[in-house]
Image (tube, helix red, strand yellow):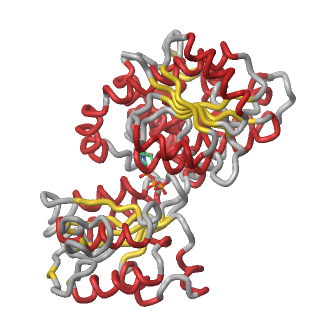
Amino acid sequence: MLHKILLVDDEQELLSILKRSLSRQGYVVHTASSGEEAWKALSETMYDLIVSDLAMEPMGGLELLKQVRTIDSILPFIIMTGAGSIETAVDAIKLGAYHYITKPFKTQELALLARRAIEHGELHRKLESFNAQEEDDQTGAMVIGNNAVIQQMMNTVDKVSGSDAPILIQGETGTGKSMFAKRIHLASSRADKPFFTIDCGALTENLLESELFGHVKGAFTGATRAKRGLLEEAQGGTIFLDEIGELSPSTQVKLLRAIQELEIKPVGGNTPINIDVRFLSATSRNLDEGVETGEFRKDLYYRLAVIPLRLPPLRERQDDLLLFVDHFVRKFNTRYNKDVTELSPSALQMLMDSPWKGNIRELENVIERAVLLSDDNIITLDSLCTNARTCAQNKYENPSQPVELKSAVEKAEISAIRQALAVAEGNRSKAAKILGIGRRTLYDKIDTYNL
Ligand SMILES: Nc1ncnc2c1ncn2[C@@H]1O[C@H](COP(=O)(O)OP(=O)(O)OP(=O)(O)O)[C@@H](O)[C@H]1O
């Protein structure tokens, strides 16, 4: 099968050169000279790869990537960037780009990257059906962790599992809000009924309302058939409203009515429909601020946040970091048929020191890449740093730099204890055995280091 590549750049000359070179490699290459043109092409053809320039007007590469991700979470995307825009390229990776390539580059470089990206995409697609199954298992295999805040949140969730109390989950992007929402649903009495997610930030106001409330035939141009809304489809189950902070004022009013009266009216219709759903919602924005500035209705906020939860960023749950690393290594070992069993000390240190601005999602991506790239079943600093993230490699590779002995020892002890606890799945007696110290000593150290 011939693979199809969509090349997007506003520099015609570069487009022709790249088209020629990639066509010679046996690809079917289409070109677009703007983000808009690319978006249109995507509605007509299924591509195996998009290679797009970053800086284009009015729709740039990042914008295009975001749009693409609303319709396809796998389609590999390579960003071409000028030397000055590395930061934005890093953002692109966080948004799900496969890689970036800095201009000027050799056409062979792009060809190599394109081949890898397409293989990567194909592998992901093959695993799609397996993933759909795994998605359910994933929540089962969710890392709960030992972190005190998380433990407390789990207690709260269990306490209200029998009620339909709406829960609002706040937290930075990638902290696991969607996963947590699914976990809440599975722990509730509605577990065997549908669970639907709707991303309030990804749809226009009209589309979102039609998705939520449904529409009658002829409600708007293109509404050739009546359609049931998700709130009706989810009867008996749970609806998860992701990025709730993005709701427009008018949709806020309609949603408030739906929650208060448990009744909806499809767009363009007059007949109310009774609904029986539990509302879970999440936001990565500071919703309190939105309420203060009047952007978000206070009454809706209180309706949604009967139980407010805040998922801590990964940097505030360092005690769970190794559990996540272990979990993702296993996950990607299975997915890619690898057998990674070790982390080099410098890789471990780097993982511990990283700020993880993209939280668990970023860590998952980093580990996925590292597992894929690992040789000899060990994750080295190298395999972590091939990622486009800023990786101050020297810091870890240069052990001769003077360090304060006491803090170095403490750091080493802390990471050894964390690793042992992770391996022992939180069982302290087992961890003490692994470390070769007494249980009492381990307890004392856990206390001293506040682990
Ligand atoms: N507790 C967890 N255990 C295992 N994996 C997790 C956990 N939390 C999150 N993940 C993984 O991290 C990734 C991001 O999680 P999720 O989509 O739930 O975050 P989010 O906070 O909803 O992100 P966003 O704000 O961008 O919507 C997912 O791929 C998920 O599999």
Depth order, front residue of 355/228: 228
User: Can you say whether 292 is above or below 189 in the image?
Assistant: below
Which residue is depicted at the point 28% across and 83% down? 259
Quadrant of the image containing the N terminus: top left
Depth order, front residue of 71/301: 71
Furthest residue toward right: 402
Q: Is residue 333 left or right of residue 313?
A: left
**Total marks placed:** 0
Q: Quadrant of residue 329?
A: top left
Q: Is residue 107 left or right of residue 264?
A: right
Q: Is residue 177 left or right of residue 131?
A: right
Which residue is depicted at the point 48% across and 67% down? 283
User: Can you say whether 124 is above or below 147 in the image?
Assistant: above
Depth order, front residue of 50/240: 50
Q: Is residue 191 left or right of residue 66?
A: left
Please say whether residue 416 is visible from this viewpoint.
no
Q: Quadrant of residue 12?
A: top right
Which residue is depicted at the point 68% across and 33% down? 80
Residue 160 in the image: state x and y as whole percent.
26, 72
Depth order, front residue of 225/78: 225
Residue 419 in the image: state x and y as whole percent.
51, 33
Residue 388 in the image: state x and y as whole percent.
66, 33
User: Can you say whether 275 is above or below 449 in the image?
Assistant: below
Which residue is depicted at the point 51% across and 46% down? 39
Q: Quadrant of residue 229?
A: bottom left
Please say whether residue 369 is visible from this viewpoint.
yes
Residue 281 in the image: state x and y as whole percent.
38, 69
